[in-house]
Amino acid sequence: MLTIGLTGGIGSGKSAVADLLQGLGASVIDADRLGHEAYTPNSEAWQQVVAAFGQEILTAEGEIDRRKLGSIVFADPAELARLNGIMHPLMARMVEDRKAELVAAGTSVAVVEAAVLFEAGWDSLVDEVWTTYAPIDAVVERLHARNGLSEEEARKRINSQMSVEERNRRSDVVVDNSTDIPALERGVKDLWQTRVEGKVQQSNG
């Protein structure tokens, strides 16, 4: 099974590319969704996070209040590092388990969609990394339209992430999403035909 790691900064079109790849036949492992699963009450991750950050991050129903937890970790880099130290290894195991299920089901191509692919060290779990790119001004506009963020808030979010230059440098493929959806569709389809289909045929052969 060919495993593609798909990453990119906020507002760069990562989810749109994941949807396009799924439409072409890939199975998508969404790290965000795994993170939600990992926070299931009384799971291993839930227990470790509550032990680290206290009962006050829980709702009345005993679920982790992601907004409360976010207000703690995004205000203090040391707290964010502590949370990541708990979650990233646990989620890496979840990715590996999901990959094993897909291999057993005969899947040819898997995509691990994760904003923090490099930061979490999950690039070691994939065969190649694709990163989505859009110019910062376009991202600021998208974040304003989609999330209602002011320009200052949008730029703060962008600047808190790994730089575009470093992410692009460490990736095998940069998917350009600087124009419109039809252009993105053409670009992804072209990459699928030139990079993916040949490798899948080789491994099947």
Image: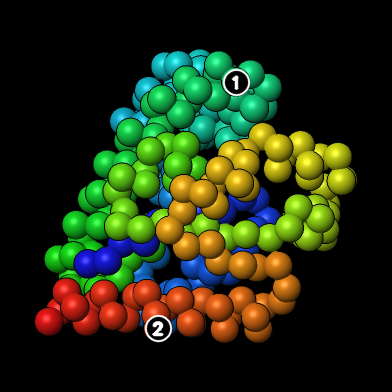
Return the residue at label 2.
193
144 versus 28 height, above or below: above
| Helix, strand or loop under label 2 | helix
108 versus 87 height, above or below: below
Quadrant assignment, res 107: bottom left
Name the side, left or right, on which 131 lies relative to 98: right
Return the residue at label 1.
77
Image point (27%, 66%), residue name: 2
Return the x and y of residue 88 as percentages of the image width and height.
39, 35
Return the x and y of residue 97 as percentages of the image width and height.
23, 50
- Cα distance between the residues tagged 2 and 1: 41 Å
Q: Quadrant of the C terminus?
A: bottom left
Residue type at mark 2 is Gln
Return the x and y of residue 15 as percentages of the image width and height.
56, 63
| Helix, strand or loop under label 1 | helix
Image point (32%, 81%), residue name: 197
Return the x and y of residue 46 as percentages of the image width and height.
40, 30
Image point (51%, 17%), residue name: 53
Q: Residues within 10 Å of mark 1 (few under 14, many from 20)?
A: few
Q: Which mark is residue 43?
A: none
138 versus 205 height, above or below: above
Q: Is residue 49 visible in the rendered structure shown here?
A: yes
Q: Quadrant of the N terminus?
A: bottom left
Q: Residues within 10 Å of mark 2 (few under 14, many from 20)?
A: few
Residue type at mark 1 is Pro
